[in-house]
Amino acid sequence: MTSAVILASSVLAVVLIVALVREVRLRRALERLLSRLLAVWRKRHAADCNSLPTIVDGPAVERDRL
């Protein structure tokens, strides 16, 4: 009886460790993917903003009407 409990506990510990390792690897992979996507977005966004004409004295915006 005692050996069955020890065996079950050992198997559970191994399964939990494997699941934790997989979760950490997945999280790191998702973080790398997100960082690459954000870098591409920032690069394209910066290029788009640099190509826009700058308006020094544009039309007044009616901010007082609320």
Image: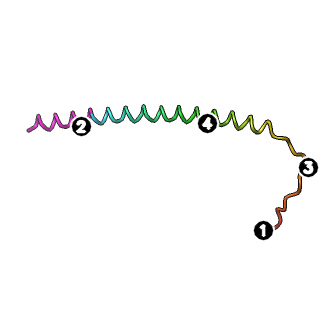
Q: Position of residue 52 (x, y in %)?
A: 81, 40
Query: Residue 47 or 39: which is nearer the viewer?
Result: 47
User: What label does residue 38 carry, if any?
Assistant: 4
Q: CA distance from mark 1 to mark 3?
A: 23 Å
| Mark nearer the N terminus (4 vs 2) | 2
Q: CA distance from mark 1 to mark 4?
A: 36 Å
Which residue, given by chain and number where applicable, does mark 2 sit on?
12
Q: Position of residue 43 (x, y in %)?
A: 69, 33
Q: Are marks 2 and 3 in contact (CB under 8 Å)?
A: no
Q: Are marks 1 and 4 in contact (CB under 8 Å)?
A: no
Q: CA distance from mark 4 to mark 2?
A: 38 Å
Q: CA distance from mark 4 to mark 3?
A: 32 Å
Q: Position of residue 26 (x, y in %)?
A: 43, 34
Q: Position of residue 32 (x, y in %)?
A: 53, 31
In the image: residue 33, left or right of residue 25: right
Decide: few, some or many residues near mark 3? Use Cα within 10 Å; few <14, some 14-19, many ≥20. Answer: few
**In the picture shown, does residue 66 fall above or below 54?**
below
Nearer the camera: disc 1 or disc 4: 4
